[in-house]
Image (spheres, rainbow, N blue to C red):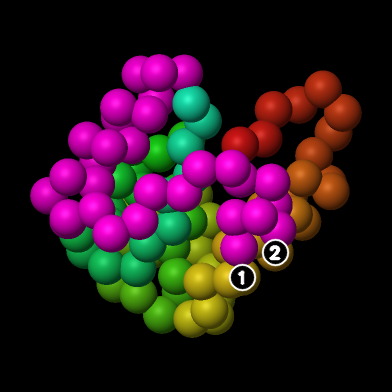
Amino acid sequence: MAARVGITRVLAGVLPENKAAEVAKLQARGEVVAMVGDSINDAPAIAQADLGLAIGTGSDVAIETAAIALVCGDPLAAADAILLARRFTPRGASLA
């Protein structure tokens, strides 16, 4: 999924209690961070991220926290959402 949208660094397998802190560390280094999640323990990191995406079949808390909620349960749909948003973002506008 990351390669499909040009993301060069992926951080996976982070313990639930460390997710938001990892997002904040990346942001402190000037990185733009997208977080895809589906559970209650993902919600703080989704909220912290520059772009939060929730899997639509996940918890209500994750869905309500995210900027984008994917209606399907397929995490690969996040790549489609990013590509679609880039396609329709006006020139000069910023998109994570």
User: What residue is rendered at 24% in x and 47% in y?
Assistant: 19
User: What residue is rendered at 53% in x and 56% in y?
Assistant: 68
Q: Is residue 68 above or below residue 95?
A: below
Residue 92, by quadrant, is top right
Question: Magenta span has 26?
Answer: yes
Q: Is residue 38 above or below residue 87?
A: below
Q: Position of residue 41 (x, y in %)?
A: 19, 59
Pointer 1: what residue? 77
Q: Position of residue 4 (x, y in %)?
A: 70, 58
Residue 83, by quadrant, is bottom right
Q: Position of residue 78 (x, y in %)?
A: 58, 63
Give the amino acid at mark 2: Asp
Q: How many marks?
A: 2
Is residue 54 rendered to the left or right of residue 74? left
The quarter of the picture where the N terminus appears is bottom right
Q: Disc 2 versus disc 1: distance between alpha carbons?
A: 5 Å
The quarter of the picture where the C terminus appears is top right
Pointer 2: what residue? 80
Q: Tags 2 and 1 in contact by the CB under 8 Å rule?
A: yes
State the SS at label 2: helix
User: What residue is rendered at 85% in x and 33% in y?
Assistant: 90
Q: Which residue range is magenta in the image? A: 1-30
Q: Is residue 81 visible?
A: no
Give the amino acid at mark 1: Ala
